[in-house]
């Protein structure tokens, strides 16, 4: 049985907590896309952790954590994250890394920073984790697969070839220090030694696990609106954030993904640049940011203040549809308890017409939010464990969103802790 957990919005929906909860009931947890550029926040008996590359299952002894072929594998970062959690008292996790995953090279991080520097004011707001240069190289067919680390002659030849190309860019476009191929080869030998204990044919492993009836959780990063095809292009990430891609990024048949739990946040937030129709500003935004998440809405990877906005039905319905959601987890609802009334974006006005369908970026730039206002519940809902015990206006808010999304809300999260969840 394969399940996916993914985000419907701009990321930071609170997937970490739900993944952690579902992870407890899973045999295998798989990262299938992205890299160490975004983070999950997990609070458990060992403490508070911001995971970037490791799957959320690393806190459980009974789970195997898998880094699939679709991931941008930063090997020293992998080592660092393992060392960090172990140093905080977590038993050493069971980790497998796909032999087909590609390696995020030191120069990918450099090129990411150089390009943002070159773009100046027009920069993408990259986290400078090397993700865009990594995926560019993967599809330009000059990336390095993990398996290639174990074939010295080919590796050496490829390092020489790729260095030559990178150095032309470094010299003439960015005017930065060149790469020394011998040093790079040395680095890759270190990477090989670090990753060696974890390498495996992940696709075969997962297909066997499916046959054996194991429970597999595909863990997505970011959300629909950051997908390179269906998001707010070009202000997107460089690998697909959709559940469908889970099949490819893990190496399993697409029809095996039976349940797609899509996490939707009770208000909106976004990091980095890009279209955000229901964005709010000034004191209204500051207050929501201050009260939001767990101790404020600031990026888990970068610490940057997140952009804030009201719930967007248009974007979230689209977000849920593109994920193929079978159920929705609605998160951080507790944060809204301070409001007398809560605006909800129910349509976009574009060139004088109102639409309920999420448009392409060029149209989105012109969209103005159409709001409906719902009454607040003015109550702290943390600690409530049954749906019927929620204040009436709070239930109305949930049911309004559920109707707009057209997918059942099966879980409501009312606090950052794992047990702060209401099942319906
Ligand atoms: P992800 O990128 O989707 O995994 O987002 P995170 O896991 O980083 O979640 C964003 C923040 O929201 C974190 O600080 C979480 O601890 C916090 N969080 C998650 N669920 C809830 C919730 O229901 N209520 C509150 N107040 N905070 C939450």
Image: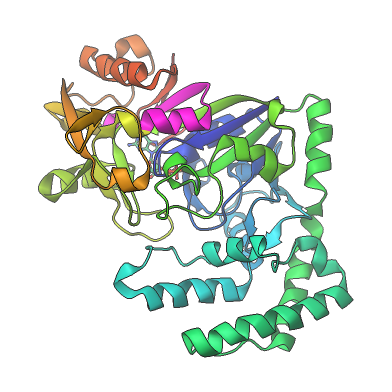
Residue 145 placement, left or right of 282: right
Q: Which residue is more in the foreground, 350 or 83? A: 350
What residue range appears in magenta?
316-334
Give yes or no for residue 129 being in the magenta stretch.
no
Residue 187 location (% of width, % of height): 71, 78
Residue 13 screen position, x and y as percent: 40, 39
Residue at position x 19%, y 24% in the image? 379
Instruction: Say whether residue 262 is left or right of residue 79.
Output: left
The spot of residue 334 in percent (x, y) is 29, 30
Residue 139 pos. (x, y %) = 65, 60
Give 259 or 357, whichever is nearer the viewer: 357
Left or right, residue 99 beside residue 107: right
Q: Looking at the image, which is closer to me, 146 or 161?
A: 161
Q: Residue furthest top?
A: 388
Name the image quarter holding residue 355: top left
Q: Is residue 208 among the parts visible in the rendering?
A: yes
Task: Note whether 315 is above or below 392 in the view shown.
Answer: below
Q: Is residue 180 above or below residue 193?
A: below
Examine the structure image and report whether residue 329 is included in the region drawn in magenta: yes
């Amino acid at each position: 049985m394969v399940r996916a957990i993914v985000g419907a919005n701009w990321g930071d929906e609170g997937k970490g907590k739900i993944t952690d909860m579902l992870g407890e009931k899973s045999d295998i947890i798989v990262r299938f896309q992205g890299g160490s550029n975004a983070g999950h926040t997990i609070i458990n008996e060992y403490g508070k952790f911001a995971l970037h590359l490791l799957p959320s299952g690393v806190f459980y002894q009974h789970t195997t954590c898998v880094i699939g072929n679709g991931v941008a594998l930063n090997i020293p970062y992998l080592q660092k994250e393992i060392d960090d959690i172990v140093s905080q008292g977590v038993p050493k996790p069971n980790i497998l890394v796909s032999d087909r995953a590609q390696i995020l090279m030191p120069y990918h991080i450099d090129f990411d920073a150089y390009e943002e520097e070159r773009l100046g004011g027009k920069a993408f707001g990259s986290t400078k984790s090397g993700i865009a240069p990594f995926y560019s190289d993967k599809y330009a067919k000059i990336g390095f697969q993990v398996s290639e680390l174990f074939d010295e002659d080919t590796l050496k030849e490829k390092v020489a070839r790729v260095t030559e190309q990178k150095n032309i860019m470094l010299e003439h476009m960015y005017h930065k220090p060149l790469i020394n191929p011998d040093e790079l080869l040395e680095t890759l030998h270190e990477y090989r030694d670090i990753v060696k204990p974890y390498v495996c044919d992940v696709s075969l492993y997962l297909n066997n696990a499916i046959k054996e009836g194991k429970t597999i959780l595909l863990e997505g990063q970011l959300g629909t609106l950051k997908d390179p095809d269906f998001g707010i292009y070009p202000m997107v990430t460089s690998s697909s954030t959709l559940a469908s891609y889970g099949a490819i990024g893990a190496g399993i048949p697409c029809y095996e993904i039976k349940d797609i739990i899509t996490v939707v946040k009770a208000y909106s937030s976004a990091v980095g640049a890009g279209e955000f129709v229901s964005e709010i500003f000034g004191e209204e935004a500051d207050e929501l940011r201050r009260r939001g998440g767990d101790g404020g809405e600031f990026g888990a990877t970068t610490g940057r203040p997140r952009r804030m906005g009201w719930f967007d039905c248009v974007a979230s319905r689209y977000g849920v549809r593109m994920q193929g959601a079978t159920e929705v987890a609605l998160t951080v609802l507790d944060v809204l308890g301070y409001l007398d009334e809560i605006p909800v974006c129910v349509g976009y006005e574009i060139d004088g017409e109102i639409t309920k369908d999420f448009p392409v970026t060029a149209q989105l730039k012109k969209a103005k939010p159409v709001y409906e206002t719902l009454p607040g519940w003015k109550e702290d809902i943390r600690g409530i464990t049954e749906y019927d015990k929620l204040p009436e206006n709070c239930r109305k808010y949930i049911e309004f969103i559920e109707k707009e999304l057209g997918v059942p809300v099966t879980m409501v999260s009312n606090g950052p802790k794992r047990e702060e969840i209401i099942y319906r």
